[in-house]
Amino acid sequence: MGNVVSLRDYRREKLLGLTYTQAGDYLYPNIALSDPPDAEPLSRYGMMRKAFIKEHMRISYTILSGREKLYPHCRAVQQQVERRITELLEHLQLTNPAPCKNQDGQAWAVHMTTLRATAEQIALSELIYDDTPLR
């Protein structure tokens, strides 16, 4: 049949400034998402949030990607998780004081690692694995 693009569609897209790439008998619009300006790569928590949305909230993932709001959302959640872990660690250290580091360094390291893991698990369940609908 060849390249089937109605004259009305062609004019409208010409006004919008779209260009096309031909692959066989098909014309594909040249559409690309812009890169975030001066964007740092996402850390572990940002990538975990992105993977969770992609796997468990597919519609939200598509919408956020299309509106170019996925990266800012993951960046915001990443910062919230880091702040929350810091807050939880401070609270856990007050409620569960660590043994003296100079007297028993190994017990102190085990205790601090356990507190860190606990704080991280709480923050992940609250912020990363939160499946409430996104706006």
Image (spheres, rainbow, N blue to C red):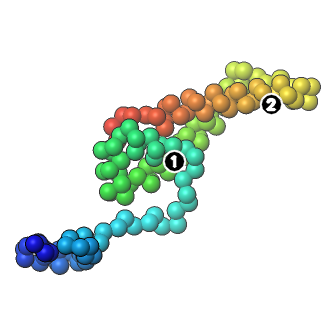
Residue nearer the viewer, 12 or 51: 51
| Cα distance between the residues tagged 2 and 1 | 28 Å
**Residue under numbered circle 2:** 109
- Would residue 64 appear left or right of 117 to someone viewing this image? left
Return the x and y of residue 63 as percentages of the image width and height.
Answer: 31, 50
Q: Residues within 10 Å of mark 2 (few under 14, many from 20)?
A: some
The answer to whether residue 73 of the structure is visible from this angle is yes
Residue in the image at 59% along x and 41% along y: 83
Name the disc covering residue 47, or none: 1
Return the x and y of residue 35 as percentages of the image width and height.
Answer: 44, 66
Q: Mark 2 touching mark 1, by CB under 8 A?
A: no
Return the x and y of residue 39 as percentages of the image width and height.
Answer: 52, 62
Instruction: Kindly state the secondary structure of the residue where label 1 is placed.
Output: helix
From this view, report whether residue 86 is shown above or below residue 94: below
* Quadrant placement of the N terminus: bottom left
Question: In the orientation shown, which residue stands out farthest toward the top?
Answer: 95
Residue in the image at 29% along x and 72% along y: 30
Amino acid identity at mark 2: Ala
- Would residue 4 appear left or right of 44 to someone viewing this image? left
The answer to whether residue 76 of the structure is visible from this angle is no
- Would residue 47 appear left or right of 93 to someone viewing this image? left
From this view, report whether residue 54 is shown above or below residue 104: below
Name the disc covering residue 71, or none: none
Give whichever of discs 2 and 1 has the lower sequence position.
1
Instruction: Kindly state the secondary structure of the residue where label 2 is placed.
Output: helix
